[in-house]
Amino acid sequence: MLGHPRFELLLGDVEQAFELRVNKIYNLACPASPVHYQRNPVKTVRTNILGAINVLDLANKTGARVLQASTSEVYGDPQEHPQKESYWGHVNPVGVRACYDEGKRAAETLFYDYHRQHGVDVRVARIFNTYGPKMALDDGRVVSNFIVSALQNKPLTVYGDGSQTRSFCYVADLVSGLMALMESDYKQPVNLGNPLEFSMLELAKKVVAMTGSKSKIVFKDLPSDDPKQRQPDIGIAKSLGWEPKVDIHIGLQTTIHYFKRLLCAQ
Ligand SMILES: NC(=O)c1ccc[n+]([C@@H]2O[C@H](COP(=O)([O-])OP(=O)(O)OC[C@H]3O[C@@H](n4cnc5c(N)ncnc54)[C@H](O)[C@@H]3O)[C@@H](O)[C@H]2O)c1
């Protein structure tokens, strides 16, 4: 992107206030993988809350529309399945995941308070697990962990008995969903994700088969507050004209190809 004439990269910490001439803001800044966001949980809370305040202040000053990358983690370990946007969630406010989950929930609160109090034009996307090329080798989330281990013939670690489920959305689908939401008139939170649900054990077996790996699957204790199931209800996103298109098999193939090249280049 750096070579593109209409692209400019400015480095900064979203915790610090900044001034820019903008008309649309996508606030994606926040570590998203549990290993990364739990490394410095106080920083994660600050990024979520001060970051939201700073982008909202900027939107308020400039009149820009602002989209928040929120998360399915606002539903916590859900007691409603699949999750609709109307569900208020089931989050442990003092657990190790709270810096992210509650940080994102507080950011949503700020978005709607700035909207009600100052008329800021807000959009909120609740993103479900997303995967695809350009993830880092040490990202630490399940799809990249499984693929990188399988390509190296190392054991794939499944937590608990592997029956917990997630729904995985290919990155290109997610990006088109974020853009569709930004361009829509819909101001309430919208789930963006792929409703096709997999157990972690099924995913591990699929990755081993697709990579032709000799890896074994090993089981470890479940981390605390790990959600047991996750599946978006995407009725609202569909009514805005968006739904995911990329089949999981194709998405995984593309991602495996990307990680193969990355490992070869090392
Ligand atoms: N990928 C997913 O499955 C998923 C799911 C739900 C929500 N989200 C949200 O979408 C957004 C992007 O996710 P991702 O998977 O690309 O995450 P990522 O962790 O791969 O990237 C996050 C980016 O945010 C930047 N960042 C972190 N703290 C910052 C700070 N204080 N100031 C400025 N930049 C900062 C990082 O440098 C990095 O470029 C995040 O807000 C995340 O919470 C992602």
Image (cartoon, rainbow, N blue to C red):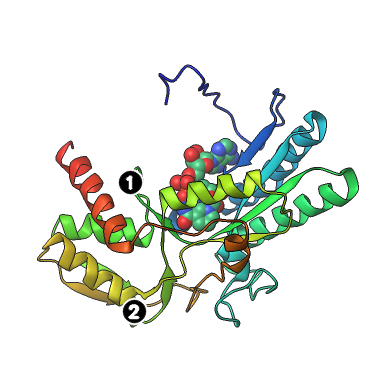
Q: Which mark is residue 133?
A: 1
Cβ–Cβ under 8 Å for marks 1 and 2: no
| Residue 79 at x, y percent in the picture | 60, 83
Cα distance, mark 1 to mark 2?
Answer: 24 Å
Kindly identify the residue that appears in the image at 72 percent across and 24 percent down: 19
Check mark 1 vs ligand 1: CB closer than 8 Å? yes or no: no
Q: Which quadrant: the N terminus?
A: top left
Residue 12 in which image quadrant: top right
Residue 38 in view = no
Kindly identify the residue that appears in the image at 44 percent across and 20 percent down: 4
Kindly identify the residue that appears in the image at 52 percent across and 24 percent down: 9
Query: What residue is pinned by disc 2?
Result: 162
* Looking at the image, residue 223 lies above or below residue 243: below
Viewer-closest of 78 and 243: 243
- Three-letter amino acid code at disc 2? Gly
| Residue 218 at x, y percent in the picture | 23, 74
- Three-letter amino acid code at disc 1? Pro
Kindly identify the residue that appears in the image at 48 percent across and 52 percent down: 174
Is 151 positioned to the left or the right of 164 in the image?
Answer: left
Q: Describe the element under mark 2 as helix, strand or loop.
A: loop
